[in-house]
Every structure is written in C-alpha cells, then in structure tokens.
Image: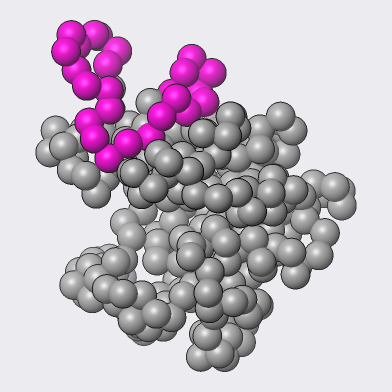
Amino acid sequence: MSQSTRTLVAIPARWGSTRFPGKPLHHIAGKPLVQHVWERCQLCKSIDEVVIATDDERIVQAAADFGAKAVMTSPEHPSGTDRIAEAASKCGDFDVIINVQGDEPLISPALIDQLAAQLRAEPAIRMITAAAIIHEDAQVQDANIVKVVTDVSGDALYFSRSPLPFVRNRQPNTVHKRHLGIYGFRKDFLLEFVKWPPSMLELTESLEQLRAMENGVRLRVVMTDDLSPGVDTLEQAQALERALTQTSTT
C-alpha cells in the first residue's frame, strides 16, 4: 500500500460519558469495552494503523496494557469527530481516516475495510458512512434510530430522526434505512470539517453529519447487513456480556 493511501482507524474513547462514566474501561467478558473494539479493528485486512483517541490517562494506560497505541487529546472536544481529527493530525501521514465508535464491540472488520477501500478508490468521495435496511416498523418511528435516504448513486439525500421517507404511497421498492454510526473521511476533509461551525439542521436534529450536507459535501452511504449493537448504558453492557458468555459456551 502506497504512502498516499495509508489508512488509519481512530477509536474515540472519552472517560466522562454522561450516561455511563468510565464506559471505555468497563469490563465485558473479562476485557475493557474499548479493547473489544480495538481487537475487532485488528482483524481488518487493509488498515495500516489503529489508535485509541482519548482524554484520560487511565485509558492510555489500559491501552498500553493490552498492546494498543493511544493518543491523548483535549478534554474539551464536543464530539468524537473532533477527537479523532486531533489524533489524526498527530499520527503522521495518513490519507484515509475511519472513525470507529468506541462503544461498538462487535463492529464488522469487513465493513471497516469496505469503507476504507471505497474512499481510496474514489478520491471524489470525501466522507462515507453506512446504513442497513430497517425491518421493524417500530424502529422507523423511534427517534433514537437515525434514518437516511439516498439517491440512485448511493449518496445521502438527508438524515433524520423522523420517519424517512414518509410513506404516503408505498412503492414496491420503498424501504427505510437505518444509519450506522461509523464514518470514513479523507484526512484533509476531516481537518476542514471540524473547523466549520455547527449548522442549523445539525443543531436541530442533533446529527453531526448534516453539517457536511449543508455545506454541499457528497456523503456516500454503503449498505450492509452487519448491525453491531452499541453500548450506551450499564444495562446494555450487562446484556452484551450475557450474550458473549452464552456464545463462548455453546
């Protein structure tokens, strides 16, 4: 892989989660949550380096203990995107940056590889993400599940917490797509993006990706069947531990 197409996976891991303080180091099936995520990223076939971007020395030390590279970043960052932008600026010569959420311990390595490969293959794409078909009507109405609609090329038309599209006249190919919280960026665009002020629709919907769209940026959406559950609460961590324990014993 040439220097101009080197790919970095950055995992933002903030200590002070409002709903779950210390979440990155919460143990699930004997390992810190962030270690599970890091180990999944290690299974990627076309990634040059994986780093954990954090604001806390306890996470830096834990990362060192299980063999990961960690980068200290400012505690003032308003989002994981800002955090990985600082990490990317400190990590040297990478052209493609993949932001893998630090609370998705079952993230698909193949999906990470797919996003990175598409960014490398199509220089006109500056930002990329993923989505999956929604099969449950209740999820269409759930404001915690972000929906996306795309054009015929697979680029996003809009993201919303509302049902999207609104089905007045259902068509044979009408589907609802659930946005997944993984992003890829060309590094130069990432460093530009975090300098832009939050946009009106971004603030209205509380969806950071709308900042890119409001500034006219093409945002590619890759479809996948891989749904990796996030861990936002202690209860979800406990449920995931039960599931992992059952899997390992069957």
In the image, is residue 170 part of the stretch drawn in magenta? yes
* Magenta stretch bounds: 150-174
Query: Which of 22 and 203 lies nearest the eye of the viewer?
Result: 203
Q: On the rendered structure, is 2 left or right of 213?
A: right
**Which image quadrant: the C terminus?**
bottom left
Where in the figure is residue 204, as x and y percent of width and height?
Answer: 34, 44
Count of marks, rendered view: 0
Residue 226 showing in the rendered view: no
**115 up-or-down from 37: above or below:** above
Where in the figure is residue 44, as x and y percent of width and height?
Answer: 60, 55
Q: On the rendered structure, is 27 left or right of 60?
A: left
Q: Quadrant of residue 189?
A: top right
**119 up-or-down from 6: above or below:** above
What is the residue that sits farthest to the left in this orientation?
Answer: 138
Residue 205 showing in the rendered view: yes
Residue at 47% from the left image edge and 18% from the top image edge: 151
Query: Which of 210 and 149 lies nearest the eye of the viewer?
Result: 210
**180 up-or-down from 91: above or below:** above
Where in the figure is residue 160, as x and y percent of width and height?
Answer: 32, 36
In the image, is residue 230 part of the stretch drawn in magenta? no
Query: Which of 109 and 25 lies nearest the eye of the viewer?
Result: 25
